[in-house]
Image (cartoon, grey):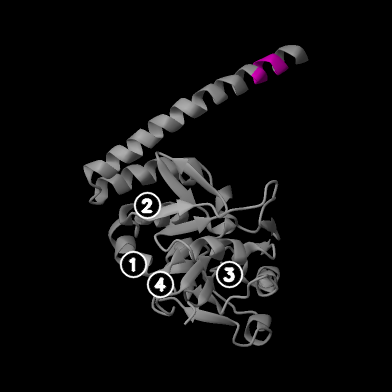
Amino acid sequence: MSIPVVVSITTLPSRIGKMRPCLDSLLAGDVVPDKILLPLPNFSQRENCAYEIPAFLKTQYGTAVEIVAAEQDFGPGTKVLGVLNRIPDPCYLIAADDDVSYQPHFLSGLLAGQRGAHAASFSYHTYRTGGLTIGQACDGFSFYSPNLRGLDAFYQDHVSGTDLFYHDDLWFSFFLFLRGIAIKRPVMEKGAGPVYSVVHNTNQLHTLSGELARKQLNRRGIQRLLQTTKTGPRKKYRLQAVAVFDGLITSPVRRLKRKADQLKRGAAH
């Protein structure tokens, strides 16, 4: 019996009417998901208003796309937490974003990795901060659903009521790290470009600034999670060791970039 494939996407009241290109691209891909779920709370905490469901979401996609009533607004993490009690288990769950159109190989590439490695998750773009590897839902973030058991309790204990509400990629990734689930990039052809193209720029999370800027949230978020979770000494040492290694690699690159910028400024004068 094959394991079903479920894509989950949440959105905001200001963006729900612009989801058609994203949904159409997913349904026209090399692999068509068994279901696309749209978990939505009754009220958006970020935009302080309710949702109005556009007609095309009710009529255009039949049973391929299903709106799910999320029990609360979990922020962008609603895309996963809002469907945990609605997905078959096991399944391959892929978190995606609503403001992009995906390339045809988007799902097939993620699934090629995920089907062969249940003890891992996959994202087309990963980066490290504080020693932690972070996947990004915009680039697709795949999960073998049994690895997500306990995620709802993790949210309530360590995320709810904090700024991490705005950075689901970080706390998803930290939860997987605690579970010993590696986050990997799927194999891609050399020179392959992004797996998506941006459709609109309405109220994007990456535009948040100040204390909610991504770099600030990364630094404070990891510190908070290390303090509030039962992260054993081995796991803490592993994060510290990777962070030191990353610093040794990136510091020379940054110095060269600063030197090049200085030379350019000098030549301009």
Residue drawn 56% across and 20% down?
255
User: The residue tagged with tag 2: helix, strand or loop?
Assistant: helix
Q: Earlier in the sequence, mark 3 or mark 1?
A: 3
Q: Are marks 3 and 4 in contact (CB under 8 Å)?
A: no
Q: Amino acid at mark 1?
A: Asp
Between label 3 and label 1, give the one nearer the viewer: 1
Bounds of the magenta segment:
260-264
Dividing the image into 4 quarters, which one contains the C terminus?
A: top right
User: The residue tagged with tag 1: helix, strand or loop?
Assistant: helix
How far across and how far down the image is residue 178, in percent?
31, 53
How far across and how far down the image is residue 96, in percent?
56, 64
Between label 2 and label 4, give the one nearer the viewer: 2
Q: Amino acid at mark 4?
A: Gln
User: The residue tagged with tag 4: helix, strand or loop?
Assistant: loop
Between label 2 and label 3, give the one nearer the viewer: 2
Give the left or right position of residue 119, taking residue 197 as reference: left
Q: Residues within 10 Å of mark 2 (few under 14, many from 20)?
A: many
How far across and how far down the image is residue 52, in percent?
59, 78
Q: Which residue is mark 1?
A: 152
Q: Which mark is residue 13?
A: 3
The correct choice, above or below, for 252 with respect to 11 in the image is above
Give the left or right position of residue 120, taking residue 234 as reference: right
Q: Which residue is mark 4?
A: 72
Q: Which residue is mark 2?
A: 174
The correct choice, above or below, for 49 with respect to 181 in the image is below
Give the left or right position of residue 17, taking residue 238 as reference: right
